[in-house]
Image (cartoon, rainbow, N blue to C red):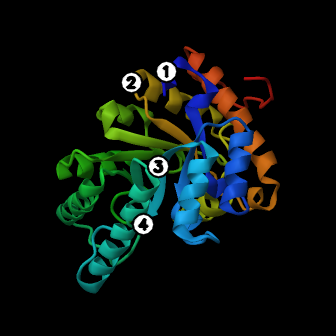
Amino acid sequence: MNAGDGHWSDFGMDTISLAGPLETKLRAIRGAGFSQVMLSAGDLAGHARGVEGAIQAVRDSGLRLTAFQLLRDFEGLDGALHAYKVDVARSLIEMCSALGAPILVATSSALSHASADRDVIVRDLRKLAMLAVPFDVKVAYVAVSWGRTIADFPAALEVVERAGMPNLGVGIDSFHALAAKTHLDQLEMALADVILTVQLSDFMVSELPSNEERMSTARHLRVFPGEGMQSAQLGELIQRLSGMGYRGDYSFQVFNDDYRQMDPARVAERARRCAIWLGEEVLQRAIPVPWSIPLRSREA
């Protein structure tokens, strides 16, 4: 993958954006011309032929698997809750490994009873990374904008660096970064190789000031990059990452109730138009893109 080269195939899709069984999603993604996919645990656990059937479907699709998600609310717990989350983490790591996915995505805890002590968070992230080591899996820690203690990229970077595990890095979810109004200059705090994956989506209002608004929009009404009100910021985010030397994967993570009622092939085609815009226009520009970039189809 050569994100800095500016080609739309540098971008992939997350199956969470599409309706239907796994095979239908994979056909739609492949049919739109994408070569990579990010999978969710529900795609495996809910498959009609079980986990092995889901793994075979992914292999048959010919798509490259970029990452596997999602482990939520792992850090800051104790007693029975901690033991429960460790067991969940082991299960997801094992599925991630069985798929051949290189990265497990884990999001910062939003539980009100999770510890706010960053020493505890660092300890638990180190433990999570150690659980993944025997499986040759990396862990991408993503700050959610309503997180109890870790709610933005700089905070996530701090605890990851303190954990000091070679298979632990940060992930960037553009929704949370923009909703939390993370200043893009703060990206430069990180080395490019610490950023393991980038998940992209847009939203259709100028700001989301409350946690309730963020949660509702994040889970039900994200849109593809360029379809919402954050086009300029998304363009600058991609350019900055490319300028830093980031050469990892970009994936469209678009939770949208309307899209999941539509033909997956049509939704995947929308994603393709966005990928063309980002890969072949944004990454080849020397300045941030203007507001309201029109989406249009064209041949890759």
Which residue is identified by label 4? 72
Per the model, the C-alpha gap separating discs 4 and 3 is 15 Å
Per the model, the C-alpha gap separating discs 1 and 2 is 8 Å
Say whether marks 4 and 3 touch (CB < 8 Å).
no
* Count of numbered circles in the view: 4
Q: Which mark is residue 4?
A: 1
Point out the tag, 1 or 2, that comes first from the N-terminus.
Answer: 1
Per the model, the C-alpha gap separating discs 2 and 4 is 29 Å
Q: The disc labelled 4 sits on which kind of residue? A: Arg
Q: Position of residue 252 (x, y in %)?
A: 60, 45
Say whether marks 1 and 3 touch (CB < 8 Å).
no
The nearer-to-camera label among 4 and 3 is: 3
Q: Residues within 10 Å of mark 1 (few under 14, many from 20)?
A: some
Per the model, the C-alpha gap separating discs 1 and 4 is 31 Å
Q: In this rendering, would 151 be left or right of 180?
A: left
Q: The disc labelled 2 sits on which kind of residue? A: Gly
Residue at the far bottom in the pictured view: 80
Point out the tag, 2 or 4, that comes first from the N-terminus.
Answer: 4
Which residue is identified by label 3? 67
Q: In this rendering, would 270 be left or right of 44?
A: right
Point out the tag, 1 or 3, that comes first from the N-terminus.
Answer: 1
Residue 206 visible? The answer is: yes
The nearer-to-camera label among 1 and 3 is: 3
Say whether marks 1 and 2 touch (CB < 8 Å).
yes
Point out the tag, 4 or 3, that comes first from the N-terminus.
Answer: 3
With respect to residue 201, does 119 lie above or below? below
